[in-house]
Amino acid sequence: MSSKLKLYIGRKIVDCLHKSTKISPIQLQPLIHVGNPKEKSKIELNLPLNILETSLGITNVNEILKIHPDDIIKSVQLVRDRANRKLSFEIDRNIFIKDVIENCSYPEINFKPKNIVVEYSSPNIAKPFHYGHLRSTIIGGFLSNLNMFVKNNVTRLNYLGDWGTQFGFIQVGVQDLNYNLDHLKQDPIKLLYQCYVHANKLAETDASVQDRARSEFQKLEQGSEEELVRWRQILEFTKGELVKTYARLGITFDEYNSESMYSQKDIRNVIEIMRNKNILKEQNDGRIVAEVGIDKVVTVIKSDGSTLYLSRDIAAAIDRYNKYKFDRMYYVVGNDQSDHFYALKSILHKMDMPWADRLVHVKFGKIRGMSSRKGTSVFLKDILDECRELVIKRQIESPTTKVPITDQETSDVLGVSCVVINDLKQRRQRDYEFDWDKVLQVKGDTGIKLQYTHCRLHSLEENTGILPAKQCDPAVLIEDEATELVKALAKFQDILYASGEQLEACLLVTYLFHLCNHISKALKLLRIKGTNPEVASQRLLLFVTAREVLKNGISILGVKPLKKM
Ligand code: ARG
């Protein structure tokens, strides 16, 4: 629904209150929600009293109850259900339905766009893309899409891990296995991983390998030109392969950054600022540490002068602020890095960076039991391949499949939908169990259900042979199923708002499953074929609106809506 009706109520409320209560209708608007009254044909918009009283300090509720009924507001009541008290406004059904159908699928933009940076995915080159990176990719994609949808300026950023002693191991492996750039180009991620595993094996029996790795990395850190050029090349190959895999997930980035952009020589002035602000302490062993919180220190520069994950992140945050002047920067990274992001923010505060509070660590839980059925490989590409194969198998077994099974793209999209929806339906910070059977269920709340409903609506539009009405005539949509579907559609914008505030995609996913249930019920009852054309075209308009909302919702979750399956 549009904000018009909510603002109308907001204005009425403000008019009733004493002039001394400084509240604007815009403040009230997000608090007003569509209710679910027992009498289905009724429309109620509700406003919880506890928020009015505690956050807005409105105590003269009785004044609000004096609002005179008019064409839009039919009555105002104080309702108690269990422990909650709310103000309930009964709204004219026809006005509500018309407003929703004409305004629900796209947001009204009445604020200045914000600059949002979303850093997500951020795998380490030469290491498997593990579940943490997968969740980060999916959740970060969702956050970016949501912010794009409400017309913020979004920068999608991937921060590749390519720096630190561990990368010395890769160098040792590359030398020991005699790989040149031509080899590495063929299958960079797997071969580099092989090098990493190989060097680590060697190190188990040969203590000198550790030293070799360290000195290889030091060569890089000290900026030996020849080594660096080679390193950058390896980074490029990896990026190339990542881009292809991301495309299957429907993920793109505006920027690929990497930790190596913030190596020793690049961050000298950042260290200088910290020194001037008296945050740093030199330790006897040569390390430089910074204090975070009370009584806790973290190392920012190692005794050999090389940088650490944390120091590179400090430099990166400053660099990004200078580039993007962000209002918010989200780091979509697992729960296990909470201490790291706490330290990062705390140091930026101590450095007097006025924007330090704009950094948000969007943390998430673990996926347990995620491995491929065929083995323990956890490369993203393998998971996606396996998913596609399983989908194809199920499509072959299903009697309702409409696309040729050779259409790999559809199977790929379906597979991806299942993995993405299964992830986003979980509360972000909770750990969950990965179970292929649950992920791919045809019945039940999966990506398949959302896609299937979208396809049904699509084929309805294509096959009825009539056009949707140009304007909504609510008087024709009299059935309860229509009213219920409209009420569900009216909640779309509220849900987007709540998902964005709480950074929880599961609110949107759960909403879309409910919406699909309402759509199925309505499809059963509100027939189009064989119905008088006036009614049919109004019903079709309702279904087109529902499809639009479903399509937008699915797309925000990062899934490509299918037209046939
Ligand atoms: N590459 C890191 C890892 O795999 C994640 C990077 C997260 N982002 C950051 N700015 N530290 O653990």
Image: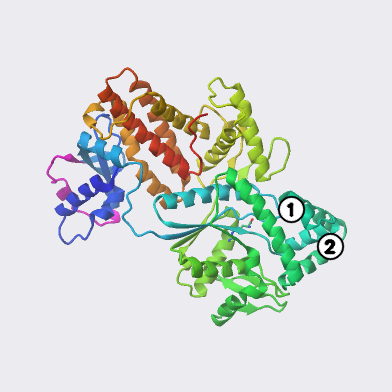
Q: Magenta span covers which residues?
A: 53-77
The residue lying at 52 percent from left, 49 percent from top is 141
Q: Quadrant of the N terminus?
A: top left
| Residue 389 in the image: above or below residue 236 | above
Q: Which amino acid does label 1 sit on?
A: Lys
Q: Nearer the viewer, residue 292 or 193?
A: 193
Q: Which of marks 1 and 2 is nearer the N terminus?
A: 1
The residue lying at 55 percent from left, 27 percent from top is 403
- Tell me the quarter of the picture where residue 481 sits: top left
The residue lying at 77 percent from left, 59 percent from top is 170
- Tell me the quarter of the picture where residue 327 sits: bottom left
Image coordinates of residue 332 in percent, x first then y, are 54, 54
Query: Is 459 positioned to the left or the right of 70 in the image?
Result: right
Classed neighbour count for the residue bearing mark 1: other residues with Cα under 10 Å, few (<14), some (14–19), many (≥20): some
Image coordinates of residue 339 in percent, x first then y, are 58, 61
Query: Is 196 positioned to the left or the right of 356 in the image?
Result: right
| Residue 559 in the image: above or below residue 116 | above
Q: Is residue 319 magenta?
A: no
| Residue 52 in the image: above or below residue 519 | below
Q: Does the magenta stretch include residue 63?
A: yes
Residue 11 seen anywhere in this rendered image of the structure: yes
Of the four image quadrants, the one with ligand 1 is bottom right
Residue 429 seen anywhere in this rendered image of the structure: no
Kindly identify which residue carries mark 1.
185
Query: Is 374 positioned to the left or the right of 278 in the image?
Result: right
Q: Residue 209 carries which label?
A: 2
> Helix, strand or loop at disc 1?
helix
